[in-house]
Image: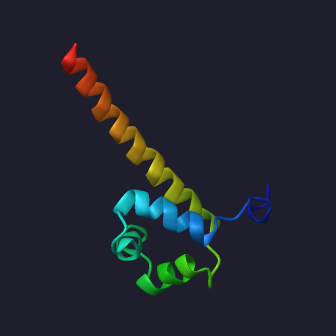
Amino acid sequence: MDEDDEEAMSADQLRDLCTRLYGAGRWQTALSKELKVNDRTVRRWASGTARIPHPVALCVKLMVFLDELSWLGEWRQTIKEDL
C-alpha cells in the first residue's frame, strides 16, 4: 500500500495529539527535539502549510500510545497496591 493511500494526518490532529503529549505550551519545540527536526518544520506542519510526512504521523501516534500505556501501567500498580 502506498503512503498516499493512507489518510494523511491533519494539522488539527497533530496539534491535538501533541498537546496530549506535551501540554498546551511549547509542544512544537518539544516535538522538534524528539524528532530531531527544525522547530520551523514542526510549526509549518502545525499550521497546515506543510504536509505531515506519514512516518512522522506514525511516530506521533506511537508516542501517544506508549504514553497511554505508561499511564495504564501506573494506574494498574495503584490498583494492586490498594488490594
Taking the spot 65% from the left edge, 77% from the top edge, the residue there is 51
Spot occupied by residue 2 in the image (x, y as percentages of width and height):
79, 61
Taking the spot 53% from the left edge, 54% from the top edge, the residue there is 61
Looking at the image, residue 82 sits to the left or right of residue 68; the answer is left
Q: Residue furthest top?
A: 83
Spot occupied by residue 55 in the image (x, y as percentages of width and height):
59, 63
Taking the spot 74% from the left edge, 62% from the top edge, the residue there is 3
Taking the spot 56% from the left edge, 81% from the top edge, the residue there is 47
For the C terminus, which image quadrant? top left
Spot occupied by residue 71 in the image (x, y as percentages of width and height):
34, 40
Q: Residue furthest left?
A: 81
Where is 70 relative to 15, above or below?
above
Q: Nearer the viewer, residue 27 or 38?
A: 27
Quarter of image, res 80: top left
Q: Nearer the viewer, residue 12 or 41?
A: 12
Where is 28 relative to 67, above or below?
below
Looking at the image, residue 48 sits to the left or right of residue 33; the answer is right
Looking at the image, residue 18 sits to the left or right of residue 12; the answer is left
Q: Nearer the viewer, residue 76 or 5?
A: 76
| Residue 56 seen from this side | no
Give the number of callouts.
0
> Please, which colouring scheme is shown?
rainbow
Where is 68 relative to 35, above or below?
above
Spot occupied by residue 38 in the image (x, y as percentages of width and height):
43, 83
| Residue 63 seen from this side | yes
Quarter of image, res 30: bottom left
For the N terminus, which image quadrant? bottom right
